[in-house]
Amino acid sequence: MSSNAIHIENLQKIYVVSERESGVRAAFQSLFHRRTSEVRAVDGISFNVDPGEIVGFLGPNGAGKTTTLKMLSGLLHPTTGDASVLGFVPSRRERAFLRQITLVMGQRNELYWDIPPLDSFELNRAVYRIPTADYRRMLDELTDLLNLQELLHKPVRNLSLGERMKCEIAAALLHTPQVVFLDEPTIGLDVTMQRRIRSFIAEYNKRFGATVLLTSHYMADVEALCKRVIVIHHGKLLFDGDLSRLVQKFTAHKTIIVQLEQPDADLSSYGELVSHDESHYTLRVPKSETAHITERLLADLPIIDLLVEDPPIEEVIEQVFAQEGA
Amino acid sequence: MNNLWDLYLQQFKTTFASMVQYRASLVIWMISHVLEPLVYLIVWSTVSLTGGGSVGDYTTRQFAGYFLVLMLVNHVTYTWIMYEFEYRVREGMFSVALLKPVHPIHSDIADNISSKLITLPMMIVVAVGLGFMFHPVIAPPVWALASAIPALVLAFMVRFLLEWTLAQSAFWTTRVGAINQIYFVLVLFLSGQIAPLTLFPKFVQIIAGVLPFRWMIGFPVELLLGRLSPEQAWAGIGAQLVWLLVGYALFRIVWRAGVRIYSAVGA
């Protein structure tokens, strides 16, 4: 068990929420009789993550991703089930545990608003008791990897969202955590900045052998960083394995794009025509028949170009939730 | 301990850097700290003048001394944690603090002391200036001055622990304002803020002696004015120590329960 960086078994989090109808009368009634209901945010999930792995944690809004990350970082007590991170029970919040992990949330505010990031970094150095030499080295490295030189001395309130996010990430990693939980680290950022943060995460993982568990709405993040993905929906685990296997498992179709010499051909007998412009045709065909149909197309028609593709990952994920979530 | 010192030092730098960004609000905040005791001073001086130069055991100039010393003592022991806590819980800022390997009270203590180090010298200057206007009588014997130092430190610690503990009510309710209001009224009347406690009826004085508020403010003021006997001073420091222990126990119990609530309902 302790060979896993993260180990969770049958983890469950049930929130008790009070509810009432709108209106004065209902408000009055709720004074005396409070109705509550249970929300199963995380409903018995189990998985292991090895040291040094980067795992993408996927699911639609409200699937239980953030709740799981909060349980793993000790902010939330699980209702039942076991969690262990680096051999610690997160909910005990032992100092030795907190010194080795970090949780970066898109909306998290680690930095003081009115002063330059460097001052907040210094405060974190003291909070995490980072030896000065280590702090210097790490600060240099983070400054280099995230391109922070220009930002370190400006008050945080004068930074753009992307610049601030880079500084937030740096602040969260100064103590060189071995386990990194990232909750939507690229949310709201432009494409260039997303790419920079992405390559930074990969670099951090490589340099420090850190274990990374990452949630994101951007499939580009997941495709670039994670070989393995864990998909949850309604608090339940739907899939745990290689990203490529996810595509195989949940897609029954492939896409064939053909370019023909003449523009107006009827291809409906080969498969479902998804789109068509001028001489380009996009067909959706059952995966098992892909080879056969391709063969027929090449034999029957004057083809200039032909391309067989897996559907985009967004579509796959959407399909997963459509199938299982109903 | 050395590491905690480093933390306090860094927090001081951070607080200082943040504070100088807001010089105007700093001045406004200080004015409010001067104005309240000044109003009581003027009211009581007027009452005393119309009453033949004294009320109870306070002459007009002794009132001036009382409220000027009160102004400084209140400033030293003052906290603003009760305003902050609700905001932190509501905005989810507490999650950030809970992820740190240090108890969040340390950064609050450091922050409080840091801003006092910056504002106290200015308050002393103001107090001295007002002294020229109101001619206060302040005549403590040397022993009283010496024992006022531990009394002030204890007053600060008791007030800080109790208010930090009370501020945690934000874990349970979103209506912290009502609780704060009750607390402030109790402090106003039972700590000696609105008037010296010796001017109140005997039963109020007894209640004030049992409750913690007098030991946070009124007691060090009376000590600094030289109005207490050595026995009363020792008894007062004893009461402060008792309240420090009670406050610490409450703080531990409420913190544990509060974090449990926070981590049960969602951070």
Image (spheres, grey):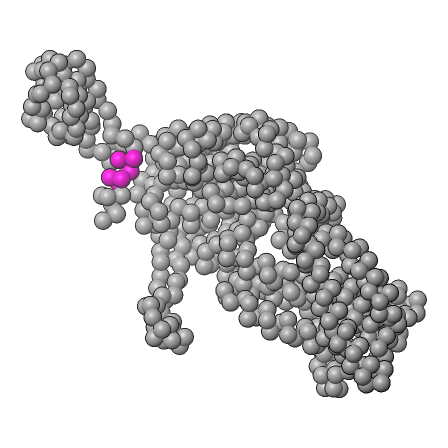
- Viewer-closest of B254 and B178: B178
- Place residue B46 in its image quadrant: bottom right
Question: Percent position (x, y) of residue B89?
Answer: 53, 57
Residue depicted at 61% across the width and 66% down the height = B166
Please determine whether, in this image, residue A187 is positioned above or below residue A266.
below
Q: In this rendering, would B212 be left or right of A34?
A: right
Question: Percent position (x, y) of residue A5?
Answer: 48, 38
Which range is magenta?
Answer: A314-320
- Viewer-closest of B211 and A41: B211
Q: Confirm whether residue B94 shows in the render.
A: yes
Q: Main secondary structure of the magenta part?
A: helix
Question: Percent position (x, y) of residue A127?
Answer: 64, 44
Residue depicted at 55% across the width and 71% down the height = B178
Report if residue B230 lies within the magenta region.
Answer: no
- Place residue B17 in its image quadrant: top right
Q: In this rendering, would B73 be left or right of B173?
A: right
Residue depicted at 47% across the width and 36% down the height = A212
Residue farthest along the right direction in this orientation:
B142
Q: In this rendering, would B54 be left or right of A105?
A: right
Residue depicted at 33% across the width and 68% down the height = A22
Q: Confirm whether residue A177 shows in the render.
A: no
- Viewer-closest of A31 and B246: A31
Question: Percent position (x, y) of residue B130?
Answer: 82, 65
Report if residue A316 lies within the magenta region.
Answer: yes
